[in-house]
Image (cartoon, rainbow, N blue to C red):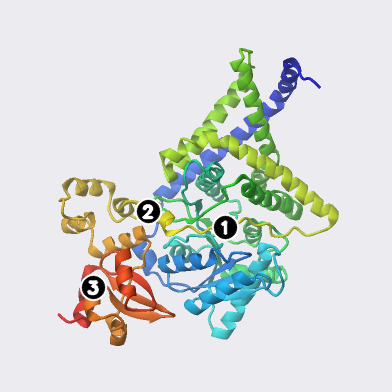
Amino acid sequence: MHLSWTSVDAAIAGLLLPLGVWILLNGLDDIFVDFVAYLAARRNASSVRPSRRLLLSEPQKPIAIIVPLWNEAAVIARMVQQNSSSILYSNYHIFVGAYPNDEPTLNEIRKLETRYAHVHLAVCPHDGPTSKADCLNWIFQNVLAYEQAQAVHFEIIVTHDAEDVIHSDALHWINHYSDDYEMVQVPVLPLPKPITDWTYGVYVDEFTEYQTRDMPARQAMGAFVPSNGVGAGFRRDALDALAEADENRVFEPVCLTEDYENGLRLRAHGARQLFVPLQANGVATREYFPDTLKAAIRQKTRWITGIALQTWERHGWIGGHVQKYWLWRDRKGLVGSPAGLLTNLVFAYGLVRWLLGAPIPDNLLMRACAVIGSYRMLYRTICVWRIFGAGFALTTPIRVFVANFINSVATFLAFQRFFVAKLQGVPLVWVKTEHAYPCQSALIRRKARFGEVLVTHGYITESELQSALATQPAHRRIGEHLVARGSIDEEAVYEALCLQQMLPQARIDLDDVPRSIVRALPVRVATELQWIPFKVDLGRLFVAGPELPTAETRQKLQQFTSLAIEFHLVTPAQYRELASQFLPA
């Protein structure tokens, strides 16, 4: 069958009016949320936040981090090792859940248990995979059993996944705000990757805009704050209330997006919720997201099925006008995503016809749609620019077309999966994507300059930094120069250095250091390399020193011990105290 340009033009012309009306209404809705987010950002900027030193000095509530797994043997060891060495919070335990029929993952967790006293295996009583929520529920039951056996009580439960890079200060923020809020959500952002990864870049664009705009706006309007699944801290009394109200179901096992569901359920129980706004200090949970079309479509199909379809079926349009409005925004992608793909096709057709010299429609509606579409791309570009820099941001408009394709295909598959499951009377099971944990080089690439860390964490101002850089002698490091100028003290320099390098900072009481531990390394070696042993725990030798460890240093120290070496930074003054106490002159 041959289609003429005239017949196609007629079909396209028939689509322009409804498509244009949708683009206009959807765009005006987004502009309204942009305005609310702007007001929220101004209010957050003027509000008084706790200083980092106050956060680190506050009493630490016991925290249980729960991590559900299915086929994660390849990444869980690196996740635990990296986060255990970088988290500055000390009063926490990690409960890792796995299924009996996932032996490789079980073996990895058992190895971690022998190495880390704060890591515990939680085995589900049945084979997997079930839903992620079901796995979380059984981990929670293991937490209760541990509490009973050890006579402890965890006041906060934090959810994480096997690919998460937890910010060193994240638990401190959750600990602080849990005094006033039953749920505290830390921002979640992708780790940076090359701009040529177009599929991965879609996650960068969408998450950056969502965390910058939607999350602050919905909180400012008084709607429920959905959990992001990771980096979410729940006060224990709130989870206990959910368990009591819903037959011990802390997380709803039939839901594919239990994180979103829990935000809604907690608000229905009157819980106060807080989204910690994205700040210049970069406190966020980072992780890798899918970087192939197939994996991205698979993951987004689950999200759309759970958020838009399952929640609609289970809860309808509950709540007041604000709540209904945000439920509508969460579900409008069921129409908006296919409309986005259709917009791509119409745009491509119009571009071809324009290049061939054919006239294109020019009316007020089309001009309004063009202006709104351009503004939308500009807004997203600016959001990405602020977090990921100019290079990534300038390719954002191109990725909009990739995002429309992925989201529309995922929407069609979500409809198919949901209704087929309903017709067949079968449950929707955990459809997970493959996870990767970042290697050390990937973590290093995202480190900020030391001066930037000092400014963003409030140790000094930008003007103080620029003044110090202008007068910095060639032989002196910027931290030393700032101390000499009196702009900052030595302890603050080392706090910032630990943040930049993702190293733990040791606070050592000399009376608690056994001399037998110090002798774990020859005195000559400890003196020469300036690393003093101060603790042995579960196969690890903790050493303290005033300089950043190098690969050569690690190699030299490792010759004298079979234990895994864990480096902790101390200030030069603290190191001198250690050396005078334990090393000969």
Identify the residue at image location x=52%, y=77%: 113
Q: Position of residue 50 (x, y in %)?
A: 39, 60
Q: Is residue 346 left or right of residue 418?
A: left
The disc, 1 or 3, on the residue closer to the chain's N-terminal end is 1
Q: Give the image quarter of residue 565.
A: bottom left
The disc, 1 or 2, on the residue closer to the chain's N-terminal end is 1
**As drawn, 26 above or below 414:** above
- The quadrant of the picture occupied by the N terminus is top right
Q: Are marks 1 and 2 in contact (CB under 8 Å)?
A: no
Q: Are marks 1 and 3 in contact (CB under 8 Å)?
A: no
Q: Is residue 221 left or right of residue 487?
A: right
- The quadrant of the picture occupied by the C terminus is bottom left
Q: Which mark is residue 447?
A: 2
Identify the residue at image location x=59%, y=62%: 271
Identify the residue at image location x=48%, y=63%: 174
Amino acid of disc 1? His
Q: Which residue is mark 3?
A: 575
**As drawn, 511 above or below 365:** below
The 10 Å Cα crowd at callout 2, few under 14, some 14 to 19, many 20 or more, is some
The 10 Å Cα crowd at callout 3, few under 14, some 14 to 19, many 20 or more, is some
The 10 Å Cα crowd at callout 1, few under 14, some 14 to 19, many 20 or more, is some
Amino acid of disc 3? Tyr
Instruction: Give the structural element (helix, strand or loop) at label 1.
Output: loop
Instruction: Give the structural element (helix, strand or loop) at label 2.
Output: loop
CA gap, disc 3 and disc 2? 26 Å
The one nearer the camera, 20 or 98, is 98
The disc, 3 or 2, on the residue closer to the chain's N-terminal end is 2
